Amino acid sequence: MTGLVETDKLPPPLKPAKMKLEVLSNPGVLADRIAAWLLDLALAKTGAFAIALSGGSTPKALYQRLAAPPYRDKFPWSRTHLFWGDERFVPHGDPLSNYRMVDEALISNVAIPATNIHAVATEDLTPDAAARAYECDLKSFYRADSFDAARPLFDVTLLGLGPDGHTASLFPGTDVLKERDEWVAAVIGAKSEARITLTYPALESSRNTAFLVEGEEKRAIFARLLAGDESLPAGRLRPDGTLRAFVDDAVIERAG
């Protein structure tokens, strides 16, 4: 379980991450571009293709796009594995559930095997037990108990950006920002409901990491992320592979 922590107790400054930026004209074009990017990556890979999913309205539009032609029919769903970067500790049928959103937008509309869907368990156990169970699932899939930078856990990690600079459920002022050993953590007290989140080590073990950001309300916070502001949880991410951001014109207008 994670509580609050003073900002000055965060780890020391890190080498700035280089971010590739792609600006699209509107949310519809944005969703289509990301879907095409994901399809190219999936088709270029042999064997399992693992994606860490994000919640939120921008990813939802992407998932809906993937569930429609031509992506629905071209994507290698049989070898695609879906994971969640974070989840609210509510039943999967709850309107707040990230699993429910992904299921309605994507999973129920494509031919993906049930064994390839790695949801966070949120019922009949505590948040801490849920975090440990999900970490076991990740380690079983990865077939190791520690990360090797040359062999990332995920092929793609999709991330959102909150107005306070959080990503996944890595919120400002929480202990989880210091976690470098556990792969998954329960975050309690930051929001009204508990959250289960991947920690930095797990999120960073990815060949491709992408922030998906849209809307005028994200201009100021994205400008800080783009400038390398490490006081933001999102600004401290240092993935093993390529880091990029897909944004629409409304985001970049004052950030460029």
Image: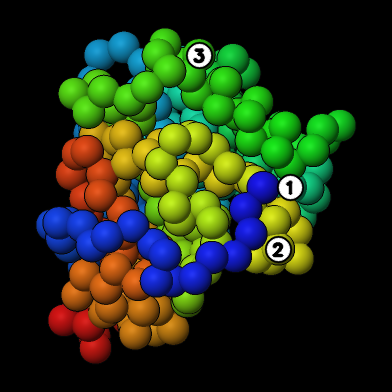
Measured along the vertical axis of the image, is residue 123 above or below residue 25?
A: above
Label 2, on which residue?
Answer: 189
Nearest the camera: 250 or 185? 185
Secondary structure type for disc 2:
loop
Secondary structure type for disc 1:
loop
Residue type at numbered disc 1? Phe
Residue type at numbered disc 2? Gly
Which-is-in-front pick, marks 1 and 2?
2
Label 1, on which residue?
Answer: 89
Residue 120 seen anywhere in this rendered image of the structure: no
Using the rendered view, name the quadrant where residue 233 is placed. Answer: bottom left
Sequence order check: which comes first, mark 3 or mark 2? Answer: 3
Residue type at numbered disc 3? Ser
Label 3, on which residue?
Answer: 140
Q: Residue furthest bottom?
A: 254
Residue at the image position 15 percent from the left and 56 percent from the top: 15
Residue at the image position 39 percent from the left and 84 percent from the top: 216
Q: Mark 3 to mark 1: distance in Å?
A: 22 Å
Residue 229: percent from the left, percent from the top?
A: 27, 73
Residue at the image position 50 percent from the left and 30 percent from the top: 82
